Image: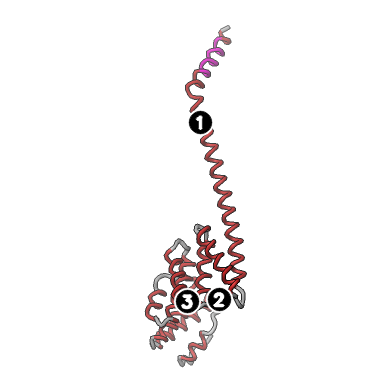
Amino acid sequence: MAELRSEEEQLDAIKRWWKSNGTSLIIGVVVAAAGVFAWKAWQNYQDSQAEAASAQYQQLLALAGQQDLGDEALSRAEGLIDTLVNDYGDTRYAELATLIQARLEIVDGDLAGASQALQRVIDGDADDYLKGLARLRLARIQLADGQPETALATLEAGIPASLAAPRAIARGDALVALARNDEARKAYQQALTLSRESEQPVYGVQLKLDNLGAEDATL
């Protein structure tokens, strides 16, 4: 009988605890389950966004890679760029699309538009490599636009080591434009050294050195 009373007391205690805490426990479980569901839904959404952005970007690459980009293809490319930038702005594909936009505007002769596109990448949330690539291309545009001093300043703003060789070439080109040939020669020689060290070939640098009369510079 004592055991029975003990069990009954335990049961009563459980009932009293449940009456006091059951509702909050259920709410906690429901909230936790909702949080897990929301997180999974967000992850699925992110994955689907990335897949959709990737598909759009692949189409853009195919169009931009054409030798002769006609009006219809150019219009489609511009539409894809707008979609990637506006609808997938939180993905790397938006930044890559902006780099392609700059290239298309250069082909179209719109250096100002290309510069603005590259500046958006530089000012945005791109990683260091993409920012450096944008700065390198912007410097080349500035050089083509007759602004070698501005190009040199752009090249000093931050370009990663993986782009050190093309940066040195661009510096050399800007220095030649400023008639600072001795400095340009050093920049080209540095580009060749970096190319050998990284085992990444650069093209046309030896010819640039030869044009400066650097007879002792060899590959």
Comparing marks 3 and 2, which lies closer to the viewer? 3
Q: Position of residue 197 (x, y in %)?
A: 52, 76
Q: Is residue 140 above or below residue 179?
A: above
Which residue is tagged 1? 27
Rendered view: 34 above or below 178: above
Q: Residues within 10 Å of mark 3 (few under 14, many from 20)?
A: few
The one nearer the camera, 69 or 157, is: 69
* Position in image of residue 44 (x %, y %): 58, 49
Badge 2 element: loop
- Magenta region, residue range: 5-15
Residue 12 lies in the magenta stretch: yes
Query: Can you identify the residue that label 3 sits on?
Result: 110
Q: Give the amino acid type for the residue marked by disc 3 in the picture.
A: Asp
Along the polypeptide, which appears first: circle 3 or circle 2? 3
Residue at screen point 55% across, 12% down:
8
| Rendered image: mark on residue 200 | 2
Image quadrant in which the N terminus is located = top right
Left or right: 55 as drawn, with respect to 103 = right
Q: Amino acid at mark 2?
A: Gln
Quick check: 12 above or below 90? above
Q: Residue at x 61, y 70 (%)?
A: 63
The quarter of the picture where residue 51 lies is bottom right
Report the Cα–Cα distance between label 1 and label 3: 60 Å
The reply to whether dot 3 and dot 2 touch (C-beta < 8 Å) is: no
Res. 148 image quadrant = bottom left
Q: Earlier in the sequence, mark 1 or mark 3?
A: 1
